Amino acid sequence: MTERVVLAYSGGLDTSVAIGWIAEETGAEVIAVAVDVGQGGEDLDVIRKRALACGAVEAEVADAKDEFAEEYCLPAIKANALYMDRYPLVSALSRPTIVKHLVAAAKKHGATTVAHGCTGKGNDQVRFEAGISSLAPGLKCIAPVRDYAMTRDAAIAFCEAKQLPIATTKKSPYSIDQNVFGRAVETGFLEDIWNAPIEDVYEYTSNPATPREADEVIITFDKGVPVAIDGRPVTVLQAIQQLNERAGAQGVGRIDMVEDRLVGIKSREVYEAPGAIALITAHQELENVTVERELARYKRQVEQRWSELVYDGLWFSPLKRALDGFIAEANEHVSGDIRMTLHGGRAVVTGRRSDKSLYDFNLATYDTGDTFDQSLSKGFIEIFGLSSKIAAGRDLEQS
């Protein structure tokens, strides 16, 4: 029986060439799988037909936008997930979504191997292969660019020699990955970290320096889930899409950073994630109102570790699953409304209200009606600082 390989297929030159390339290198039949996580571009059926025309024995396409939003982006919102306190895990979240569909296709078609288009230098190779091995330990993984020296020039030559039905146009100066949660841009002149980004790098966001009227929005959450925008019910996907449009129009969500890749190098990345940043900002503030202090403090530690695990490709790991349970519990009372002003590249919270609020006006006020018993503070401070006071006394005696 002929071996079968499931290929993560985008419809572009590299993965189209990879169909025939893999067949020649391994003698296997190739099944192409394309997953729509809101990246835009060509119609899925067009992509499916192109895969077949390039030699795939089977081609599957999956509209996974809602699945991606609800099962992957939503946990990141609940976790306030920002790798290195800045990056909302745009690409890292889409990989396990795609992995799930690749593994399902491999089981369905009896494939022994899964292939992807990653290089040996980035994080995505780890995210794909660690995810695949977690869901299906018996599957093998190959990467034509990494494993079989399938360079861009070689891919174009192969395409022309085989007369494949795909344009071999001049490559963009950037490497771009995008989905509904955001857009990642790297390489080209951005590799010189002194060079500032230029406007043609951006697609999801307008120039924040351009004068325009501010946009005020009210986001409603129920147990950490965005359920309405300005009082109108939305799905998680719709919340992201609407805020991509509204926050993006105000230039919100532009990020230019040098980040620590899992493979040990530092990489300059430019991101734009207007909906993600607006939702995480709103969610963080609603937690400030509704989550008890010690739980909130500990959750911030969990958020950092959760973000690192997802960035590093360990979405399906036991620790990540365990932290999911903690994060779900911590969001139990994160319900209410957050009012934000979107303007000049910033999403600024201006109002909060919640039936689950822990904010007590009478305890907080300095005016008439104050119910905070200030006479208790003197003794509290004495006991709270006692251990430090004793240690300081010892140090003074010994100095």
Image (spheres, rainbow, N blue to C red):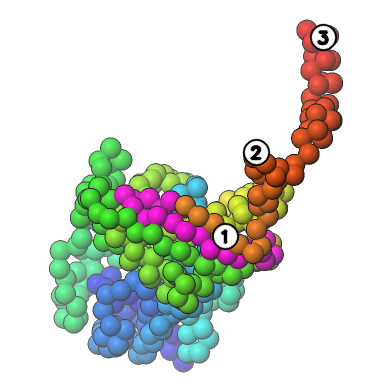
Q: What element carries label 1?
A: strand
From which residue to which does the magenta span run? Answer: 329-348
Image-quadrant location for residue 9 = bottom left
Visible residue check, residue 263: no
- In percent of width and height, residue 65 lies at 42, 77
Q: What element carries label 3?
A: helix
Report which residue position mark 3 lands on: 398
Q: Which mark is residue 353?
A: 1
Instruction: Tell me what residue is drawn at x 16 percent, y 71 percent.
Output: 168
Q: Residue furthest front?
A: 368
- Is 354 inside the magenta-drawn segment? no
Query: Where 330 sits versus 37, above or below?
Result: above
- For residue 203, side relative to residue 101 (left or right): left
Q: How far is mark 1 from mark 2, CA to CA? A: 20 Å
Report which residue position mark 2 lands on: 366
Amino acid at pointer 3: Gln
* First reached walking from the N terminus: tag 3 or tag 2: 2
Q: Is mark 2 on a helix, strand or loop?
A: loop
